Image: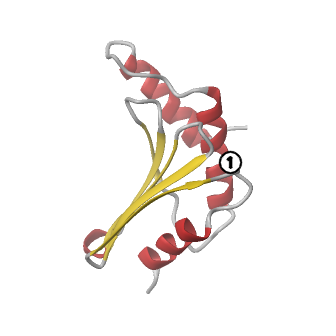
Amino acid sequence: MPSKALTTALHEARLLGADRPWTPPTPATESEAACLLALLAAEPAWPPGEIEVQPDGAIQLDWDAGERGWVTLSVNGHATLTHSAVIDGDEYTLAEPWDGRALTDWAAEVLRRLWRA
């Protein structure tokens, strides 16, 4: 079952996309996003990310830690978890195969680096 935040983001994207040439997320993308949110909710060290539906139908979660940096995790319904980040001036980008059962090690690592004290 999708989270309230995901349901809200999907509703807002459908309203915005009605007048634009946007591609709505596929059911597979929505399912991957729901899995990702559930996995992230189980980790109390990280605040919730901001959910955004992209014009290409991908769903991304964004975290911004001010001057320290930012992290974006994205799913697109193709069993791939894409992440990009800038943390303390270092840039990270990677797309990994993802089965939705656990957060990939590197995605977890960039979130740990962002929120490390």
Location of residue 67 (image quadrant): bottom left
Location of residue 69 (image quadrant): bottom left
Q: Residues within 10 Å of mark 1 (few under 14, many from 20)?
A: many
Residue 68: x, y in percent? Answer: 30, 76
- 48 vs 117: above or below: above
Decide which of 92, 115 is in the foreground and name it: 92
- Residue position for label 1: 35
Q: Is residue 71 visible?
A: no
Residue 102: x, y in percent? Answer: 70, 60
Q: Amino acid at mark 1?
A: Cys
Decide which of 76, 70 is in the foreground and name it: 76
Decide which of 93, 60 is in the foreground and name it: 93
The number of callouts visible is: 1
Give me the residue at 52% from left, 58% from top: 48
- 108 vs 72: above or below: below
Residue 51: x, y in percent? Answer: 47, 45
Give me the residue at 55% from left, 52% from top: 81
